[in-house]
Image: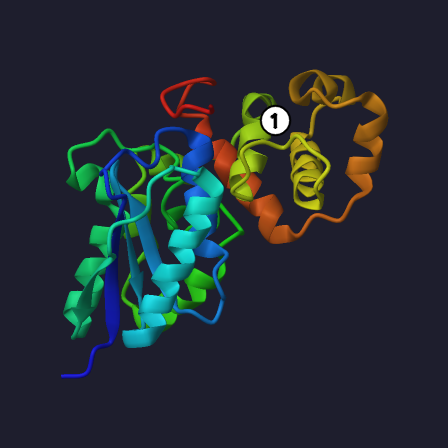
Amino acid sequence: MEEIGTQLMYRLEDDRVLCRFMRERRRVARSFLERDPELPLLAFGAADTHLHSLLAAAGDVAREFARRVEISIQRALGPGVPFSRVHSKPIRDQHHLGNTFFYVLDQERRHGLAPDPFADATNIPDLLGLRVTGRGTIVRVRSVLPRVRREELVALLPHGERLDRPLDPFQRLPHLAEAAAAALALPSIRGRQPERILARAAAVQAAEVPRRMIVDALKIPRRSVQRLLQMSVPPALARAVDLQTRLRSSVPVGGPASTR
């Protein structure tokens, strides 16, 4: 029977924990999402000591994807030890593909770990519009797994019900910096790189409060606020920041998901 997909599992040779902090979870996410867009990624997820991904591909394509991910993670995290040989499992029918999709996304809970309330080390945020880095996976999942429902994905987030509850601007303000960083899988909105400047613009434009409050909350110079208000922010990013603030309103600032 022809393979219709591949599940890949990655771990380091000494089996050490890979994703302890927020910055590591987001770097791992980028390692998966920034691979060649033509490589058909459907899902990825992290437990403590290992990672899983699901591709709608097999053979050489899957092996090349795994190779690129491992190189990217080594460069991003510098763990100091190599990866063990990647374990691959062929997917041979649609039922198996669907079950594996949810298995990969729900790694932390399946291993008895406290789930990251923001799912930074999965592509759940991309599939629900909370992050724009991996929007391509939305199209692939709709094409290959058309029966996946939004409600099923929302249920994987510990406070997913908050995505449908709008916040007033003053509730949103304390979460804007982290929301904008998470929407682009960045460790923070600080820095001069174009993507970080865009994240700051998205945060400023989502604030909808007096400018003096934006300056205080985001630690941005007053003279920069006007410039950032005039920047063009893609609608998908603006929507992602809004959804991120809704989700983050359920967790105290500086709460359980470490921002180190």
Position of residue 172 relative to residue 86, above or below, is above
Q: Where is residue 68 in the image (x, y as percent from the top left)?
A: 42, 59
Q: Report crowding for label 1: few under 14, some 14 to 19, many 20 or more residues within 10 A (C-alpha).
A: few
Q: Name the residue under label 1.
A: 169
Answer whether residue 126 is visible to the viewer in this image.
no
Q: Where is residue 104 in the image (x, y as percent from the top left)?
A: 25, 52
Question: In the image as oriented, which residue stretches furthest toward the bottom?
Answer: 1
Instruction: Tell me: 214 left or right of 45.
Output: right
- The number of callouts visible is 1
In the image, what residue occupies the spot 24% across and 76% down? Answer: 4
Position of residue 105 relative to residue 47, above or below, is below
Instruction: Tell me: 191 left or right of 149.
Output: right
Answer whether residue 248 is visible to the viewer in this image.
yes
In the image, what residue occupies the spot 30% across and 58% down? Answer: 149
Question: In the image as oriented, which residue stretches furthest toward the front?
Answer: 81
In this view, the residue in front, 210 or 13, is 13
Q: Position of residue 25 (x, y in %)?
A: 41, 38
Position of residue 85 relative to residue 27, above or below, is below
In the image, what residue occupies the spot 70% across and 19% down? Answer: 219
In the image, what residue occupies the spot 19% across and 83% down? Answer: 2
In this view, the residue in front, 145 or 170, is 145
Instruction: Tell me: 52 left or right of 260.
Output: left
Q: Quadrant of residue 252?
A: top left
Image quarter (top left, top right, bottom left or bottom right) of the N terminus: bottom left
Q: Position of residue 87 (x, y in %)?
A: 20, 58
Q: What residue type is labelled 1?
A: Pro
Instruction: Tell me: 197 left or right of 62.
Output: right
